[in-house]
Amino acid sequence: MGGNVPYRIIFMGTPAFGVPILQALIDGPDQVVAVVCQPDRPAGRGRKKNSPPVKELALQHEIEVLQPTAIKTDEFAVTLAAYKPDLIIVAAYGRILPPHILNLPPLGCINVHGSLLPRHRGAAPIQWAIIEGDPEVGITIMQMDEGMDTGDVLAQSALTPAPDETSGSLLAKLAQLGAITLLEVINALHSGGVAPTGQDHAGATNAPPLKKEDGYIDWNRPAIDLEHLIRGLDPWPVARCLIHEREVQLFKPVVVYRDSSQPPGTILSADRQGLLIATGRKCLLIGELKPAGKKRMTVGEMLNGWPLKPGDICRQPVTEK
């Protein structure tokens, strides 16, 4: 299958990462015949149901949207088969595809994954790339198999993250890069095919989903590790600590390469430059904070109503067992 005949494509994705990728497919020469995303979820204080970003884009272009609660049923298999897809594209759909879906289209299922596989297999590759301080990050276009991000690689594109990169800013960059790289692969399929490359499974690392508790700062860790963690958890689940027994979210970290004789977690200075905090190795300057129930603000703004001072302690919240 190839040539100039447009492919019939089913796109499977849910969050914002999938939006530029779906848009690129819509703008391309092939036909997106259906979009599959997870069901609407309640969010916010009012628990109002929110539509996934991918669904919103699909509806704007009058593309049929499927939101199954279960994808392993015979009924859903029949529904997908009725669209006669040549190819299924997956980008952060959020569920493992069963064999009957993987084997449905003649060209199989292709995944757009936010890391340079085999590094960071799993649900949160972009966050973990920043948390672990990767000097190079990127996108993998992969032929899917039954494993967790274990399929053969069709293409990869890399970039160098900015020094102040957050998972939010990097997600936007990699989504765009993923769209470009995916179209290159699809064009190659039209022209005669792509030579897949097997992954080096010995080099695989995991990128499991993150939880709120992952953001609780342990100030005994080195400042460089905490800087990576804070940026990797922004915008979710966000790094946090207790100051005066009040939970505070932390943003805009910068390592300050000086030693301190104070215990880790001690505030060394508090001014318009930020909060300078002792860690297990060197110090960390926090530029922005968000106290519980308040908006995100600079440290200078926060000091107008909350006079933090040197000697105050930033404490790790106690997790419930």
Image: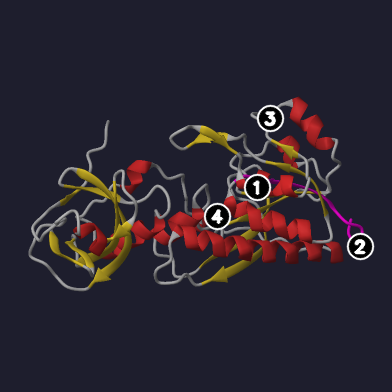
C-alpha span from label 4 to label 3: 27 Å
> Does residue 308 show up magenta in the picture?
no
Picture layout, residue 256 above or below residue 101: below
Question: Element under label 1?
Answer: helix
Q: Earlier in the sequence, mark 1 or mark 3?
A: 1
Instruction: Answer left or right for 137 relative to 286.
Output: right
Q: What amino acid is found at the position of numbered circle 1 in the picture?
A: Val
Task: Please name whichever residue, 210 or 294, is drawn nearer the observer in this view of the structure.
Answer: 294
> Does residue 2 show up magenta in the picture?
yes
> For mark 2, what is the residue?
4
Instruction: Answer left or right for 222 relative to 208.
Output: left
Q: What amino acid is found at the position of numbered circle 4 in the picture?
A: His
Q: Earlier in the sequence, mark 2 or mark 1?
A: 2
> For mark 1, what is the residue?
54
The image position of residue 249, as x and y in percent, is: 30, 51
Q: Earlier in the sequence, mark 2 or mark 4?
A: 2
Picture layout, residue 106 above or below residue 304: above
Q: Which residues are magenta?
A: 1-14
Q: Nearer the viewer, mark 2 or mark 4?
A: 2
Colour mapping used in the image: secondary structure
* Res 135 quadrant in image: bottom left
> For mark 4, what is the residue?
201
The image position of residue 235, as x and y in percent, is: 43, 53
Question: Element under label 3?
Answer: loop
* Res 194 quadrant in image: bottom right
Q: Where is the C terminus found, in terms of image quarters?
A: top left
C-alpha span from label 1 to label 3: 21 Å
Question: Element under label 4?
Answer: helix
> For mark 3, what is the residue?
72
